[in-house]
Amino acid sequence: MTPPTGEHRNTSLYVELALTAAERERVRALAGDVPVWFAQPKEHTRRDVEAFAAASVAVGNCPPEWLAQAGDLRWLQLSSMGIDRYLDLDWSELGRRITVTNLSGTFADPVAQTCLAGLLALYRGVDELARLGERRTWSKEPIRPRLRLLTGASVVILGAGTIARRLAELLAPFGCRVTLYSRRMSLAELDALLPETDVLVGLLPGTEETAGLVDAARLALLPPGAILVNAGRGSLLDEDALVAALREGRLGGAVLDVTATEPLPAGHPLWSTPNTLLTQHTAGGSDQESGQILEVFEDNWRRFVAGEPLRNVVRWSRGY
């Protein structure tokens, strides 16, 4: 849906982002004479609920149940790339009046850098050395011969979007052989790659097709010492099978930014699984995050005001 030119004249704007005072002024300047309501994420008051219900444009990840009651809402700019919490809504009905845009492409650099950092930490033993440092234990002789080089590694990235392409660029100086797995490849082709894969990276959206893609059988295809990275969706991975493979020493390690359940329960076995780095869904974060979100919103706001097509419109039939 493309808003018609001039619709903004009757617009009110709801903003649910953690912004500095300067960033709030930036939003007010952009909105001009349009009323703006600022709410703190996850700290909703009754007045926040009322402001959202009256808004025609909203920015931020509002509670999904609010959308059905927001009869004036025409455009929702999410503050995330993921849309999982909204998938169960009736978009055949809501989609007739609400356009939803996300932050696709915005987090390419931070997520790719976290993936690379996790890989280097495992390859170079930084995770183990950090734990030894906390215990004030010197263990140079047994550790040094076990350190590995990322140089020349065979990397298969599940996904071919902006994050996958950026990670491929970051791996290029290491001489890694990178293959991007996309819809154009068959599962048989993927399975043929896995026995020669040193690093398997998951960067796929959460859909019915990707759920459970990295299961016990595919983990078993990976060679001994292979490392798994998942920074896409927790649903991609059979976590029980991964825990077993790591505890038995069949795999060399895992970097998990996402898990099936978040926050990860205190008693979950992943907390104590060897050679596992849990980055707690922080990969998209940086000290520039709020500014980047505002840049996307500003561009789309100008399009909304001009009656032009919005960017990063969510395609609910595809699940992203």
Image (tube, rainbow, N blue to C red):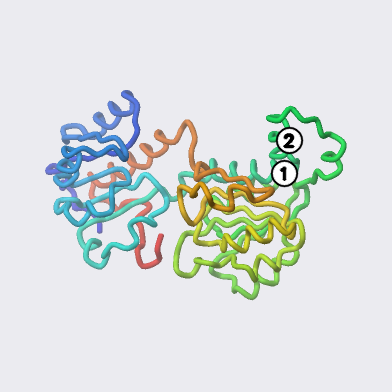
Q: Which residue is most to the top?
A: 21
Q: Quarter holding the C terminus?
A: bottom left
Q: In which quarter of the image is residue 140?
A: top right
Q: Which of marks 2 and 1 is nearer the N terminus?
A: 2
Residue 24 horizontal/vertical position (percent):
29, 28
Q: Residue at x 52, y 55 (%)?
A: 161
Three-letter code, disc 2: Leu
Three-letter code, disc 1: Pro
Disc sitting over residue 121 in the figure: none
Residue bearing mark 2 = 129
Q: Which of marks 2 and 1 is in front?
A: 2
Q: Looking at the picture, does residue 208 appear above or below residue 262?
A: below
User: As drawn, is 177 to the left or to the right of 282?
Assistant: right
Residue 156 horizontal/vertical position (percent):
66, 59
Asked if disc 2 and disc 1 are in contact, CB closer than 8 Å, the reply is no
For label 1, the SS is: helix
Residue bearing mark 1 = 173
**Residue placed most toward the observer, 162 or 287:** 287
